[in-house]
Image (cartoon, rainbow, N blue to C red):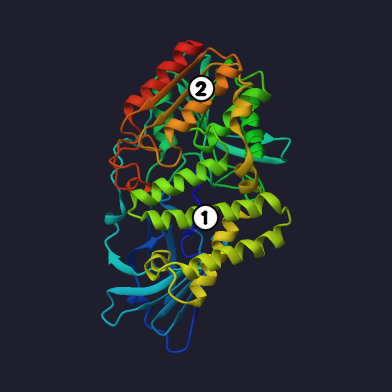
Amino acid sequence: MRTLLICITIALAPLAAPPGAQGQETGEGAADPSEFVGNWMGALNVGAVQLRMRFEFGESGGVLTARVFSVDQGNAEVPVESVTLTGATVAIAMPVAGATYEGTLSEDGSRIEGSFVQMGSTLALNLERTDGEETLTLRPQDPVEPFPYLSEGVSYPNLDGGHTLAGTFTRPESGGPFPAVILISGSGPQDRDEALLGHRPFLVLSDHLTRRGIAVLRFDDRGVGESTGNFAAATSRDFASDVLAGVAYLRTRDDVDAGAIGLAGHSEGGLIAPMVAVASDDVAYIVLMAGTGVNGERILLAQGALIARANGASDEAIAANQALQRAMFEVLRSDPDVERAGEALADLVRNALEEAGEEMRAQAGITDDASLDGAVAAQVQAVNTPWFRYFLTYNPAETIEQVTVPVLAINGENDLQVPYEENLREIEAALRRGGNTEYEIHALPGLNHLFQHSDTGSPAEYQAIEETWSVEVMELIADWILQTVGS
């Protein structure tokens, strides 16, 4: 679930470029490329979290090559188009991600000091040599092949959207037909594993459910990974049509029980699942995992305050950020013209940042006029989109009232992104208003938005926690599905 804080989100493309595929230009007086060869590691400070970046420099025939990986986003490789070496400064162009990096090698060759620029925002990114093994984060729950079940790459069309979705289908090796579930990811461009910060939640969850006898379909969002389509132009309603395409696909499979197909949505996915259940008679049940029961404005105001407070922000700073949020929301609600709204939003953000203290600007990576311009542009770009405008005012409770199939709704009590009390209360109230009596509601102590055992629930903890999913929660989900639709 996205947050509206004074920060930026680095959304790196998960598509890989072949090693050395980029061209390399050498400027006059260039350093010896061999001085760069090896693995380098640095971290981008993007507000609540640190995103580690790994650079792998190589040399071929005196030409410097580079591969770039976002370690905490599933170790996704960022396609590199060109590498330019001028003196001791290397410049790397990554147009697929809308990014560039420029850094200068220190005299002793142990450090590269530079900046990462993406979509107009500039962040410091200093690299230090590493042996490569340090980039590996222990994730003991990640399943290791060979799996004791069938795992198949699949693709299927969304005829309404005119694009193709790709994913992974898993089921037990023998028996069937099996009850099935489609996993629906949270907000932002997500791959089929919902990879973030070194975790692959949907890989772990699908492994657990499949071992319990449930077939699972997980898929890349449109425009992500192997799926085609335009992610940037889509709203939650459009993503619901992608899930409907998945339901239609599962109904074509002989190894799936067509009467026992359900949905399990995480975060925004928990908003989308009820849409699909109302639209299709082929959905037998839904699981809402940190799903929302109130509109986006209420979610964003609450999560912004909770996360800021967990990260040590003062009441004064929280109040200032909420005032900015409300002003931005009013612009988005009242002005449908994207260009005009963008200008008004830019003025609001710029004024807020200029009035903010020096420490707050430094935390947002703002050190000069250029980085200020970049931060303003990034914040406006993040909210002045079809998705954000839709999410801001959409009331999920109105849809949940119409859901007639069994519902399991779960939230962690340490969830700072979708606060459990208000959202579970509103989900249950909507189900009651609609006359649905087949539901379970669970508030789970000590668990955060990712259903990890946590101390505070702050997103800053996600990466450091080795656990990807609470086993108890996965068992709760599996037990409920099997009890609801049979094994």
At a point 60% along the width and 65% down the height, the residue shown is: 346
Question: Counting other residues with Cα less than 10 Å from the Cα at mark 2, is it few (<14), some (14-19), or many (20 or more)?
Answer: many
Q: Is residue 372 visible to the viewer in this orientation of the structure?
A: yes
**Residue 52 falls in which quadrant of the image?**
bottom left
- Name the amino acid, label 2: Glu
Identify residue for label 2. 428
Q: Is residue 453 toward the left or the right of residue 44 in the image? A: left
At a point 60% along the width and 42% down the height, the residue shown is: 391
Percent position (x, y) of residue 257? 56, 15
Question: Counting other residues with Cα less than 10 Å from the Cα at mark 1, is it few (<14), some (14-19), or many (20 or more)?
Answer: some
* Vertical position of residue 151 compared to residue 99: above or below: above
Percent position (x, y) of residue 481? 46, 17
* Vertical position of residue 287 compared to residue 9: above or below: above
State the residue in front, 251 or 240: 240
**Residue 88 falls in which quadrant of the image?**
bottom left
Q: Is residue 119 visible to the viewer in this orientation of the structure?
A: no
State the residue in front, 23 or 107: 107
Q: Secondary structure at mark 1?
A: helix
Label 2 vs 1, first from the N-terminus: 1
Identify residue for label 1. 323
Q: Is residue 219 toward the left or the right of residue 54 in the image? A: right
Q: Secondary structure at mark 2?
A: helix
State the residue in front, 243 or 306: 306
Percent position (x, y) of residue 219? 54, 37
- Name the amino acid, label 1: Ala
The mark found on residue 475 in the picture is: none
How many numbered callouts? 2
